[in-house]
Amino acid sequence: MQIRSLFEQIKNFFLSRAPLVFWYKHYKILYFLCFCVVLGFGGWFWYYSLHRYSWNDEQKKKFLDSYVKETNFRESRFREAVDQLKHAAIDHEKQPVLKRDIFSGKSSQ
């Protein structure tokens, strides 16, 4: 019987306006508590990621090797881009030769 009366009390509580009244009276506090929980979790995660990292020597060496390869790859791409720009500059310095006069419609040769 006790369980049934407990369920009835819970049912009556949620069917009544009590939750709505509770929300209207305390919504600012509830938002503030949620904000504090999220802020605390974010602070803990930030602290953990900054000060509690755990890389062993093998992982550090692997990262440094991949970083060097990536840097070399970027350097080669940079050199290719510079060469392309030099060729484009040379092409732009050349004077174009008009083979046809656009005003008269006749060829200039």
Image: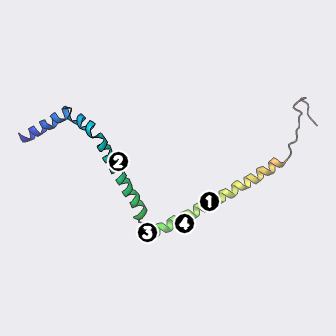
Q: Secondary structure at mark 3?
A: loop
Image depth: mark 1 or mark 2 in front: 2
Residue at the spot 48% in from the left edge and 67% down from the top edge:
60
Left or right, residue 42 beside residue 13: right
Say the numbered circle drawn on residue 35.
Answer: 2
Q: CA distance from mark 1 to mark 3?
A: 26 Å
Which amino acid, by three-letter code, is at mark 3?
Answer: Asn
Which amino acid, by three-letter code, is at mark 4?
Answer: Asp
Q: How is the image coloured?
A: rainbow
Q: Of 3 and 59, which appears nearest the observer?
A: 3
In the displayed structure, would residue 108 be above or below residue 71?
A: above
Q: Secondary structure at mark 4?
A: helix
The residue indicated by pointer 1 is 73
Mark sitting earlier along the chain (2/4): 2
Q: CA distance from mark 3 to mark 2?
A: 36 Å
Where residue 6 appears, x then y in whole percent?
A: 11, 40
